[in-house]
Image (tube, coloured by chain):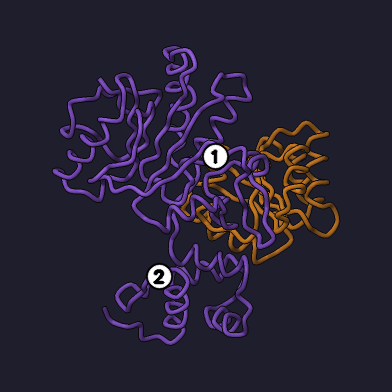
Amino acid sequence: MRILSIDDSKSVHAFIVLCLENSGHSLQLANNGNQALEIITASPDNFDLILLDWEMPGLTGPEVLEQLMKMKITIPVIMVTTKNNPEDISRVLDIGAREYIMKPFTKDILLEKIQSLG
Amino acid sequence: MEKIKTPILLYFANLIEKETGIIYSQENSYQLENRLLEICKALEIETLENLFKLAQDGGIQGMKKQFLMDVATNNETSFFRDSKTFKAFEKFMVPEWLCKKKEGQQLRIWSVASSFGQEPYSLSMLVQEMVESGMKLNSAEILCTDISDRALKRVKNATYSHLEIQRGLPANLMVKYFEKTSDDSWKVKSEITQRVTSQPMNLLNIYGIRGLYDIVFCRNVLIYQNEEKKKEIIENLSAFIPSGGYFIMGAAESLFGLSDKFNQVSYESAIFYQRK
């Protein structure tokens, strides 16, 4: 799958890069929501899946998700965040996120969630 | 068994043994090291030395401690493990049972070696989803058995760690059927636990089972037995499966050469067995 990961944390991105090494998936990184929306709107057909952090400078994850929904961009989104309250999880699932990963996570969890949307 | 030589690894080995009873020795210390390095990366801790310092300073508590235990002990159990089997259960076995059932008959399911409960609770969630979609399954019963008291205690507690809850369970079912506890664990709601009962069971000496079970899950149980014992266990279990009932094994297992009391059935890519 062609995956776009949106997260402001370099260490999270380093871990995701490591997890996806030799997995057959390709990965592009964005450090914030605005940058991600530019990348996606420029070429929405370039991605099969989005990994989206919640708390970032500028646009938050849910705000990015709302923008994607408004633009009728149908790339599946997996939220990847430290937020682990059922209310928060339900909220983003209601907005349109397809799956949810709570940090910290393992390589197995990331790969399984990606595969479940494949 | 040789004691681990590296002081940092020995510290974590002792901690894991104290918490879980799982023993790491010098021979498999490299596995422990690899798993600790994975924990460092996932927790954004730069080095093993820093993880060691954090643990010594009491900084590995609650969810972080459970995370460490789960990864270090390589807890592989997951919800909806081998998803095609659950799809066959939902789309083929249960609908077929519904067509054949007698008036007032209850669907009876047996999870033979239920381990920590992920299999019976996955089945109960699916049954609940089917009930909500209009199927008349209101009185389904799921029995789970295991030889291990520790495993059955986990089934009864019905509580899963931050990491366990993320293995195989779709997020929508997680928020629907689990509630978060104060220590960042997740507890199965009573609407799912209420149709699940558990009891200890040695498959070579089955007793205390009443009646027949329409669908029997016996996945990745027999792989630890020799051929003679496999045949004996299957013979024992087949006495509790009615004609037309289903017997389900693990994805890498087969009844071939072990019993002539079943026909092989497949649904999409799932393979299972029907009692003659």
Front disc: 2 or 1: 2
* Left or right side of B23 for B51: right
Helix, strand or loop status at disc 2: loop
Q: Position of residue A62 (x, y in %)?
A: 80, 46
Q: Position of residue A104 (x, y in %)?
A: 62, 61
Q: Residues within 10 Å of mark 2 (few under 14, many from 20)?
A: few
Question: What residue is shown with label 2?
Answer: B21
* Left or right side of A1 for A52: right
Residue B50, compared with residue A74, is above or below; it is below
Q: Which chain is orange?
A: A
* Left or right side of B86 for A101: right
Q: Nearer the viewer, residue A116 or B250?
A: B250
Q: Quadrant of residue B251?
A: top left
Q: Residue furthest left?
A: B228
Q: Colour of chain B?
A: purple
Q: Residues within 10 Å of mark 1 (few under 14, many from 20)?
A: some
Q: Nearer the viewer, residue B271 or A43?
A: B271
Q: On the rendered image, what quadrant is the N terminus of chain B found in? A: bottom left
Q: CA distance from mark 2 to mark 1?
A: 33 Å
Helix, strand or loop status at disc 1: helix
Q: Chain ID for label 1?
A: A
Q: Position of residue A114 (x, y in %)?
A: 56, 44
Q: Chain ID for label 2?
A: B
Residue pictured at 25% horizontal, 35% vertical: B254
The kind of residue on which mark 2 rests is Gly
Residue pictured at 62% horizontal, 37% vertical: B191
Residue A90, compared with residue B130, is above or below; it is below
Question: What residue is shown with label 1?
Answer: A116
The kind of residue on which mark 1 rests is Ser
Q: Nearer the viewer, residue B139 or B13?
A: B139
Residue A108, compared with residue A75, is above or below; it is below
Q: Quadrant of residue B222?
A: top left
